[in-house]
Amino acid sequence: MAAAKTGDVAGAPRSARTAARDREPLTRDLVVAQAIALADVEGLDAVTIRRLAQEHHVTPMALYRHFRDKDELLDGIAERMLADVALPAPSDAPWDEQLRGLLGALTEAVRAHPAVASLVRPRIMSSPPGLELAERGLALLRSAGFSVEQAAELGTMAVTSAITLVTAEPGAPRIWDPEARDDEIRAKRARLAALSPRRYPNVVAAADALTNCASPPDYYRLGLDIVVAGIREARSLR
Amino acid sequence: MAAAKTGDVAGAPRSARTAARDREPLTRDLVVAQAIALADVEGLDAVTIRRLAQEHHVTPMALYRHFRDKDELLDGIAERMLADVALPAPSDAPWDEQLRGLLGALTEAVRAHPAVASLVRPRIMSSPPGLELAERGLALLRSAGFSVEQAAELGTMAVTSAITLVTAEPGAPRIWDPEARDDEIRAKRARLAALSPRRYPNVVAAADALTNCASPPDYYRLGLDIVVAGIREARSLR
DNA sequence: ACCTGAACACCGTTCAAGT
DNA sequence: ACCTGAACACCGTTCAAGT
């Protein structure tokens, strides 16, 4: 529905050559940025090779000059997300405060583009910015006294949790049209509120909180708090 | 590659009518079971309407008698998974032990079919078995002194973590052919081990633990421990 | 009631050319 | 070096029939 041919619109038909010279040259970064922007508006399912090509007024095959296949495009998106993480500088603060800072920075970056959040976790170890994050986290966990193996497992869990807070946020959009989204949330809350209060008293009472995030800042603060607290406690549990 | 026509194989071609009478009638449960079995072997991407129809020697459209669309098939898979959760009976044990029992049961059920784990979390509130799990969890959190809102958020996080332990298990298969999977794990470990030990000392040291789960029982025990410990601590953090 | 068949509007991707 | 064009083997889904 986008992308009418520019020549047709202007009323002065242009050759493919002219059109090709007009548009800015396709680069990897440009395609990745466009993919993220598209996901923001229409969700990850809308991000297809053909759709991106169309938006760049280019043949689908033109993208294969920059990405071997679609998975490499998704890698590019994840790497960009990780590059956006504003890691706090190392400091003399206690390890748990610093860990909390790392996780908070990750959550913030991912929150900006929730539609592509699911791409990040499996790809952390595949790019320098992700490796930097992992190295910092592992170092903090080691300094807290955890073994290499424990640090690896706990670090994986912590990073996973920080990202999953975003994808599992109550009222997380499975639908990207904002008003259709509101409709879905309302319908879901009504369904829960209409359940038998004898069988599901607590679900009914929590219908609102389960379907909508009243205060995202509180939600993320609580989420990161329990992740860090759990890891802190793990030292005595082991 | 599966599903050669039975008539062709037997050398005695049969009419579509005969074939239709032979096969067991298509039911919703049967299709769901087949879908899970297929995902177990070839991953979730292999679960398509057309592929399932082919395995049942039926036209794709025949499935639409039991599911309005593909999403309803995925709903069916998630519901079946939740019905498989062996919830422990309520007891007089402390709330945190009981919560741990609920989460452990969820993790066990999901672990049996990791390929469809991602379908479960967003659909917990959509079927009786999921609602039962949620109700039990919320009741325990309320009994621990959390407010309705806190219980809703913490319960959501706990359930999410229990499921995500499975999808994020180190060495989690993004590829379902078992030997191709081993190859990928080996390659990934080698990549990490080959990084600069000056820039990424802890990543290099943890290359093994980051790519392979040495002891799944320990991994899941630790994971559930820190989730429950984090929630326990949240009472004093608030 | 249950299934079929043809068609539509999409996918990712390969191969062989064009300029 | 960068892009095109046609084709292939897939998707989910609609509509109109068949028995």
Image (cartoon, coloured by chain):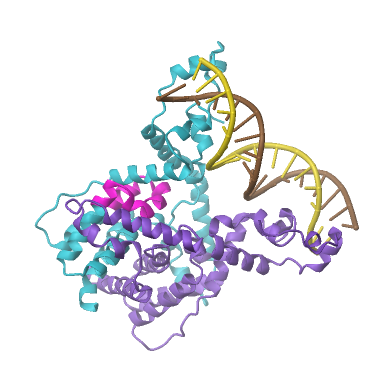
Chain colours: A cyan, B purple, C yellow, D brown
Q: Is the magenta stretch mostly helix, strand or loop?
A: helix
- Give the side of residue D11 with respect to residue B103, left or right: right
Q: Most extreme residue toward the left, as rendered?
A: A92
Closer to us: A126 or A179? A126
- Give the side of residue A57 with respect to residue A81, left or right: right
Closer to us: A197 or A136? A136
Q: Where is residue A186 in the image (x, y as percent from the top left)?
A: 50, 55
Residue A66 vertical position relative to residue A225 in the rendered view, above or below: above
Residue B208 vertical position relative to residue A6 in the rendered view, above or below: below
Quarter of image, res B202 = bottom left
- Give the side of residue B157 with respect to residue A183, left or right: left
Does the magenta run of residues contain A124?
Answer: yes
Q: Is residue B127 visible?
A: no
Q: Position of residue D11 (x, y in %)?
A: 62, 49
Residue B63 vertical position relative to residue A75 in the rendered view, above or below: below
- Give the side of residue A206 with respect to residue A143, left or right: right
Q: Where is residue B34 in the image (x, y as percent from the top left)?
A: 63, 66
State the quadrant of the C terminus of chain A.
Answer: bottom left
| Residue at x-position 51% and y-position 41% | A46
Quarter of image, res B108 = bottom left
Q: Position of residue A136 (x, y in %)?
A: 20, 55
Quarter of image, res B52 = bottom right
| Residue at x-position 44% and y-position 21% | A23
Report the magenta residues as a range: A105-132
Closer to us: C1 or A205? C1
State the quadrant of the N terminus of chain A.
Answer: top right
Does the magenta run of residues contain A174?
Answer: no
